[in-house]
Amino acid sequence: MTIHRGAQAFPRAEYIGRLAAVKDEMARRDLDALFVTSASDITYLSGYTALSDYVPQGIVVQIAEEEPTFILRRSDAPAAIYETFLDRSRIIGYPEALVGNPDRNGYDAVIDFLLESGLGSRGMGVEISNLSVQTAEKFKDRLPKARIVDCTNAVAWIRLVKSDREIEIMREAAAISDAAILRATEVIRPGVREADAVAEIMGTLARGANGKPGTMFKPICLCSSPRTGTSHIPWSEDVFRDGSQINLELGGARYGYCAGIMRTFSIGAPSDRLRRIHDAEVAGLEAALETVRPGSTCSDVANAFYRTIEKQGFRKETRCGYAHGIGWLEPTASLKDGDMTELTANMTFHLMLGNWIDEDFGYVISETIRVTKTGVEVLTNAPRQIIQV
């Protein structure tokens, strides 16, 4: 019995359109081939989401070929056959002899393919920053006649503007995020272990919302007093207590696309300090959202937030968010002072307004947003309040 292609999140035509945009960029840089290793870029160009980038793998896009070639570990090749739009002839599984081998690995299989395809002496784009120094040197040593060009983030900038179908999937992910926040309000209670609450939240992230299940987990960050002054710590073995503050960040995920959300909880009445920063941050959030529209810059949005909270006596040292979609963080535009990236319809961001003020005190709130033709659509919809339980 052979494995067959599974249900596809996107039609073939959409993938071909994405590849056409990549090939336009390749032509601009005078490249015949592009080797893509970023897991998120691989998802974007093929639909593949399996967690196999712990070993060498990547997609080779050729100007002269309609479909790219996916080279990965042989034991992971069936996942590529099932998940991607690619013809199975375009999926090459390299042998296990290249795994855990100190001399030759999966990147040698990629280089062998490039040489056999006649690309060894042409313009070759590589996402250099995703490779180790030793691997980058291997490409240069084994392809001495090739003109190797660093194309790190070239695909990421192309995927910054989403299609309507991508937006639809992110809405589905956002509904899961909202459902998980609702579940958190039900399970965060005095005496409950943090781990047990997270288990319930993760159950919702898997079951999904509106008949659309989550298709993978993104990291959950949960911290309770006195650990709220940090941003990316996981849950502990502790239990929730009366008077505790809890900061929670999570995101539903569909087909690799996610929608982040952050909310602050209080067991019992929130402190005056927490109320003050919440009021300032919500006002700043609303000011930032009012600034989001085509033609505004990332810097404009960030500074609308900064100015608003500074009027109320607060400052935020970290950025206000980042491009958001596949793989959570898209390494392109940042919502920060000085980033002059101009907003365009169907860009999506995690407007992330976490503010870590002291070693033992911080506050979080965020939304996943989409730039529309006239303004902004907020994809996440949980109440913007300190959630008192």
Image (cartoon, rainbow, N blue to C red):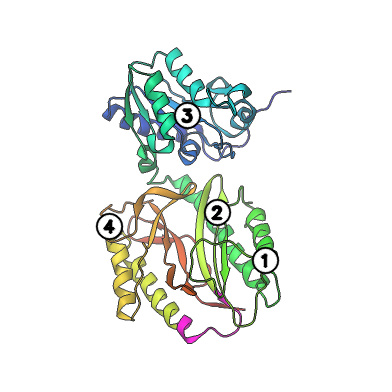
Say which amino acid is labelled 2.
Answer: Glu
**Towards the viewer: 17 or 329:** 329
Q: Position of residue 208 (x, y in %)?
A: 63, 55
Label 1 secondary element:
loop
Classify 58 as above or below 187.
above
Say which amino acid is labelled 4.
Answer: Thr
Question: Which badge, 4 or 3, is on the more N-terminal residue?
Answer: 3
Q: Position of residue 326 (x, y in %)?
A: 48, 46
Query: Crowding at label 1, few (<14), some or many (≥20) Cα neighbours within 10 Å?
Result: few
- Label placed on residue 172: 2
Q: Residue at x 65, y 75 (%)?
A: 240
Residue 74 in sight: yes
Look at mark 1 in the image and give the residue it sits on.
237
Judged by depth in the image, the label closer to the viewer, 2 or 3, is 3
Among the 4 quarters of the image, the one containing residue 93: top right
Query: Would you say the residues marked 4 and 3 are in contact, meaning their CB atoms lie under 8 Å apart?
Result: no
Query: Would you say the residues marked 1 and 2 are in contact, meaning their CB atoms lie under 8 Å apart?
Result: no
Q: Residue at x 52, y 31 (%)?
A: 56
Is residue 313 toward the left or the right of residue 134 in the image?
left
